[in-house]
Image: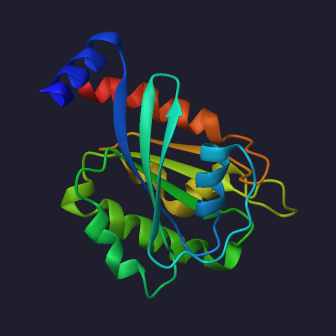
Amino acid sequence: MGNSLSKAMGKLFGNREMRILMLGLDAAGKTTILYKLKLNQSVTTIPTVGFNVETVQYKNVKFNVWDVGGQDKIRPLWRHYYTGTQGLVFVVDSQDRDRIDEARQELHRIISDREMRECLLLVFANKQDLPGAMSPAEVTEKLGLHRMRDRSWFVHPSCATSGEGLFEGLSWLSQNVKRQTQ
């Protein structure tokens, strides 16, 4: 009863919850992004084996963020996290030109799954502070996003260690989840 009442009040007063799945190749910066958003500080990370989950409050949205490891041996498990996902945050290492095709293949595998058809897609073109980083336009092209006509997507430059661009991405998600639910 209490949970139903709080959900109804949330809808009435604009508070929302959103389930976010954060995926990407290993070493793209997913865990660094998660804890920069949660703690507003850079933390030392190790490769994620399994997942991290944190709640990040931003404006009137409570983002339940699932950060799942990106090593190739773990990727087949990603699909077990798809159910109920409203937003996919796909993190790309913008400096890693050697693996951008691999990132494209993985992204298209994820979004072609029927469980992920309705979810919003935010791509963080991460590590923009590094020399030779691809621009968001180049990441968009390399990921083949312009061919996506049936989905809301947005590519935003970011730097996980400084936090640059991260909250702008959450803003886009919160604005677009409102449109989805109306």
In the depicted view, which residue is nearer to us: 159 or 138? 159
Q: Quadrant of the N terminus?
A: top left
Question: Residue at image x 27%, y 18%?
Answer: 11
Question: Quick one: 150 or 118, which is closer to the camera?
Answer: 118
Residue pushed farthest right? 131
Residue at the top extreme? 13
Q: How many marks?
A: 0
Tell whether 153 sits left or right of 182. right
The colour scheme applied to this rendered structure is rainbow
Question: What residue lies at 38% left-to-right and 39% top-to-bottom?
Answer: 152
Q: Is residue 157 above or below residue 43?
A: above
- Residue in the foreground of this view, choosing between 167 and 38: 38
Q: Residue furthest bottom?
A: 73
**x and y, in percent, of residue 37 in the image:** 62, 44
The picture quadrant where one finds residue 101 is: bottom right
Horizontal side, residue 30 vs residue 15: left or right: right
Q: In the visual, does 160 lie left or right of 70?
A: right
Q: Residue at x 55, y 75 (%)?
A: 48
Report x, y in % for residue 178. Answer: 34, 24
Give the residue drawn at x 58%, y 53%.
34
Q: Which residue is farthest left?
A: 1
Query: x, y (%) of residue 139?
Result: 62, 57
Residue 30 location (% of width, % of height): 58, 61
Q: Quadrant of the C terminus?
A: top left
